[in-house]
Image (cartoon, helix red, strand yellow):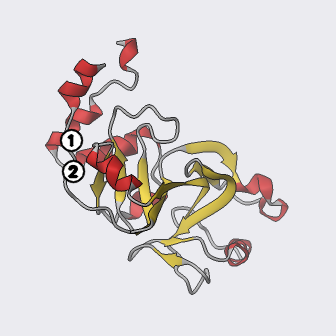
Amino acid sequence: MTMYNNIFKITHNNVLPAQGSILISEPFLQDAYFQRSVVLLVEHTQEGSMGLVLNKKTELIVNSFFPDLKEFPDMPIYLGGPVSPNRLFFIHSLGDLIIPGSLKINEHLYFDGSFDALKRYILNGHDIEGKVKFFLGYSGWTKGQLHGEITKNSWVVSHATNRNLLIAEGEAFWKRSLESLGSQYETWTKYPKDPYLN
């Protein structure tokens, strides 16, 4: 394992995290939530950070939990992180005029807001595919924790404001996110998911 780490180790890119940043995990992380994950930082302050794993789709759908939404197209739920795993969160591109109480993340994305307003929007016949993404739980870091993980090269930070974040899923999105940072990070995409099987 140490041999693999030495071959594939790349230091972080010195981009500082901020609200709206993307955290891309290094290939050595074996954690169930964060292995090959891309995390959107919803909030980042001196006191701590909150993010949502974008590319870990579950088999659950929102429709199953709300009888009035059962007849609508499936709305998948993603695994946002290990904190509050029984609470539903969402990001969207609808803005705070349509979804009051939303927190603006960047020019394209908003976090949460009135779920009742979102339900009314859906029930009134508006398509939300590619506009809303649902999560169970979130990822949280206490004061200084995320900085420490970045310093240890657990994450590489990107400031990409990509609209595709609302439809991103799977390991392929993790690979594309790394490749967009430059050729030096393509090495990470070649690292075996389970080096002990090679």
Tell me whether the residue at label 1 lies in contact with that at label 2, contact meaning CB atoms closer than 8 angstroms: yes
Give whichever of 167, 78 is nearer the camera: 78
Q: Residue 181 carries which label?
A: 2
Q: In this view, does 98 lie to the left or right of 116?
A: left
Position of 71 relative to 150 (above/below): below
Q: Where is residue 48 in the image (x, y as percent from the top left)?
A: 45, 63
Residue 28: percent from left, percent from top: 35, 31
Q: Which amino acid does label 1 sit on?
A: Tyr
Q: In this view, does 188 lie above or below 179?
A: above
Image-quadrant location for residue 7? top left
- In the picture of the structure, the residue carrying the numbered disc 1 is 185
On residue 141, which mark appears? none
| Residue positioned 59% across, 64% down in the render | 90
Spatial CA span between label 1 and label 2: 7 Å
Residue most extreme to the right: 67
* Quarter residue 44 falls in: bottom left
Mark 1 lies on a secondary structure that is helix
- The image quadrant where one finds the N terminus is top left
Tell me the crowding category of disc 1: few under 14, some 14 to 19, or many 20 or more residues within 10 angstroms, Cα based: many
- Of all residues, the one furthest to the left in this rendering is 183
Q: Which residue is drawn at 42% across and 44% down?
A: 37
The residue sitting at 61% across, 53% down in the picture is: 137
SS for dot 2:
loop
* 167 up-or-down from 187: above or below: below
Q: Quick one: 105 or 29, which is closer to the camera?
A: 29
Q: Where is residue 129 in the image (x, y as percent from the top left)?
A: 56, 62
Q: Which residue is at a point 55% across and 52% down the rendered structure image?
A: 80
Residue 148 left/right relative to 108: left
Q: In this view, does 76 lie to the left or right of 163?
A: right
Q: In this view, does 124 lie to the left or right of 134?
A: right
The amino acid marked with disc number 2 is Leu
